[in-house]
Image (spheres, grey):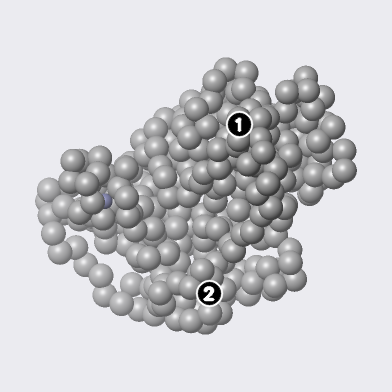
Amino acid sequence: MKTWKILSPKVLTEEERPDNITADTQAKVKVTQVLFTGTELSAYLGHPKPKYPVVPGRYAVGVVGETGAGCSVEKNERVYFRDFTPCGSCPACLRGDSDDCAEPKTAGVNMDGYMRDFVVSEESNLSPLPPSVSDDEALFIGIVSLGEAVIDRLNVSKGMHVAVLGAGEIGNILSQLLIYHQAVPILIDSDEERLAVAAQCGIYYTVKADETMEENIARITGGRMAAGSVYSSFCGLAPDLPFGITAAGGIVVYTGYSFPEISAQLKAALDKHLTITSVANDRTGDAAAINLLVNKAVNLAPFQLQKRPAAQLADIFKEEAAKAEAGKRMQCCIVNML
Ligand SMILES: [Zn+2]
């Protein structure tokens, strides 16, 4: 079966390797689509120091081809691959709460990802997709789950103003989920195009990160400022920007697939007694995220992600790497693996 592999920074290869069902609890799945995100780009660029070789591809969907005798998934069923595998040995795993695993392995980071034509997987790693969730939507299950974990951490209440810094896919989806939970997101970015997409997604307060930003947030919040702020990693905004727009005693959450080297001037945060925390590999679980998609809690159509064939993978990596090196932000796309 065909597998794409990153051997060292900027060296992508394709290889054939045999992969067959070896247990009754396994299924062989044809990968149909993979989401290309910052996780794939980071693995390719070599930060933060991946353990090579890496098979990239964190978020993917497929169709079951063959099943072991003990599987309940059926042939031709559409499935989402779990992007996390619990370690199986931490206290949370041992008490059966694998969603709270302390050291989960992440697909495409420290375990094989899904940029392959077929994947032989334990059935427990597959989430069957209801008909009302399209393949394109299902690729965002992991990000919806991350957004829900951020919302848990914020302890969101009805009408709470939350400033979200960075209008990429994580900030956008998080803002839509905040609306679903009856909070009031204020989405901030320096890029007007991203803010326009957010507005099409139904996010009503979008604010440009410029000299009028604090004033605008004061106006929206009736002078109280945001009770909580969320900063998405790699969004290009100053990491201490949340300190000025969060109300005294508020919470600031840093989130993303991973974090770059960050330094920030802490005095403003300390003077205001802010709580600073992070949510990166925390999850609320795929089942809850799928349920949110069934309930149309997020509108992903305005993203208008480009779909590109797997044959162009080498070009996609090269183009996004060149953008990153020029200081530009990356663009997610859907890789069609058929
Ligand atoms: Zn564990």
Quarter of the image with the N terminus in it: bottom left
- Alpha-carbon span between mark 1 and mark 2: 35 Å
Task: Return the x and y of residue 249 as percentages of the image width and height.
Answer: 60, 30
Task: Return the x and y of residue 152 as percentages of the image width and height.
Answer: 46, 32
Amino acid under disc 1: Gly
Q: Nearer the viewer, residue 132 or 287?
A: 287
Q: Which residue is mark 2?
A: 46
Direction from residue 332 to residue 40 in the image, left or right: left
Q: Nearer the viewer, mark 1 or mark 2?
A: 1
Name the residue located 43 percent from the left edge and 36 percent from the top edge.
Answer: 289
Residue 52, quarter of picture: bottom left
Task: Return the x and y of residue 203 as percentages of the image width and height.
Answer: 69, 30
Q: Which residue is mark 1?
A: 250
Crowding near pointer 1: few (<14 within 10 Å), some, many (20+)? many
Direction from residue 19 to residue 297 in the image, left or right: right
Residue 76 against residue 39 in the figure, above or below? above
Q: Could you tell me if residue 158 is visible in this image?
A: yes
**Residue extending farthest top:** 158
Q: Could you tell me if residue 117 is visible in this image?
A: no
Q: Which mark is residue 176?
A: none
Name the residue located 62 percent from the left edge and 22 percent from the top edge.
Answer: 160
